[in-house]
Amino acid sequence: MSKKSSKRRMKLKFKKDSLLGKLIIVFILLIIVLNVLRYAAYFKKEDNSQLSVIIQNDTNVEMQHDVYIDENKIVYFSEDDMRNLFDKELYYEKDEDNLRRYISISQSKILEITEEKNHMYINGTFTKIKGKVINRDGIYYFPISELADVYNLEVDYLSDTNKLNIEKLSEEKVTAIVNRDTELKYKMTAISRNIEKLSQGDTVTVLDSSDKKWIKVKTKDYQVGYVKKSKLLDFTKARNDLELANAEFSNFDLKNDVVIEINDESYENFDEKISTYENRTELAKELTSKVSKEISTNAELNSKNIGLKMNITSISNIDNYYRFLKELKAYVNANGCFLIVVNNSNLNNDIVKDIANIVV
């Protein structure tokens, strides 16, 4: 073998080894980059410039419009977000001044609130408020922090951390106690960044306990993160699920309890009586008063459940009837009475079941 061919082979081998070495270095660098990208989120610093909205256990609420918070820390939600989050049936009628008068119905409360006015009516009772329904760039906003009592909410905004926390007081809440000093983690891993220190004896709200090792929790200042399950004890139901429709109004006995029936013969021109919000409110108050009078004049009824039974078949405007039933239910439930609705071929069974305490 000649010296030239030997040198040529050595050069080729050197080039191959050099190329292989470079490929190995590139591969290692690629792995490092991928791992950096993979774990970067674990060390991501929280951006407090963006408002964080937490509603119950949902820590990533997607709002259709920006939340507006005024100089008095009154929190405003858009009309679309109000419908999406709290009352899908929210509607309005124009008043005598051509202003929007919104009507919203919860389990036992009817809200009436008119744009640009610093007051509202709850079940017909006048209430002064600091906020009002406002129009910002064509979008109507509601002072949700002023309406907390209507929707059975607890609304709290922390400006220091730019966090808005909303508790639905009708839904279950579970808490736990930190049993020794630990860290609130950004992700479910020990290498994740620390959000804040938790001290022994701190109370946290449990958001998700489905993982075997980690619990998703919320602190008293609404920081959300993960704690090892071993660091928590005394899991307690701080608030039970209080769905009124299923709890307070589920034990009516149609045979032995008292039923006051309203049918087609009770009123002439029933459609007219439910044609506007004012007419519906007047009729709802009249029927509620009828039930209250029945109770007050008969002592034996104090030990029985009372049900107002709506058995109306001659209806032209079904949508107005559905609205009336919802509004009537709020009035009678607020007085501890049941709303019983007789279903018929004119009505949508699913809608009626969603409204009434009892469907027959």
Image: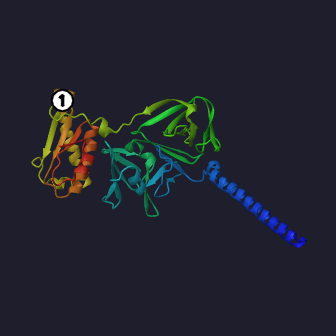
Q: Residue at x 90, y 70 (%)?
A: 3
Please identify the residue farthest to the right as the structure is shown: 3
* Badge count: 1
Q: 347 or 336, which is in the foreground?
A: 347
Please identify the residue farthest to the left as the structure is shown: 265
Whether residue 117 can be seen here:
no
* Secondary structure at numbered mark 1: helix
For residue 345, side relative to residue 37 (left or right): left
**Circle 1 residues within 10 Å: few <14, some 14–19, many ≥20:** some
Locate residue 295, reporting x and y percent. 19, 32
Q: Answer above or below: position of 360 versus 137.
A: above
Q: Answer above or below: position of 254 versus 359.
A: above
Amino acid type, residue under disc 1 in the picture = Leu
Q: Residue at x 54, y 42 (%)?
A: 222
Locate residue 49, reporting x and y percent. 60, 53
Disc 1: which residue: 301
Locate residue 94, reporting x and y percent. 31, 60
Q: How is the image coloured?
A: rainbow
Locate residue 25, reporting x and y percent. 75, 59
Please identify the residue farthest to the front as the structure is shown: 1
Q: Residue at x 48, y 54 (%)?
A: 62
The quarter of the image holding the C terminus is: top left
Splitting the image into 4 quarters, where does residue 198 fall? Answer: top right
The quarter of the image holding the N terminus is: bottom right
Whether residue 240 can be seen here:
yes
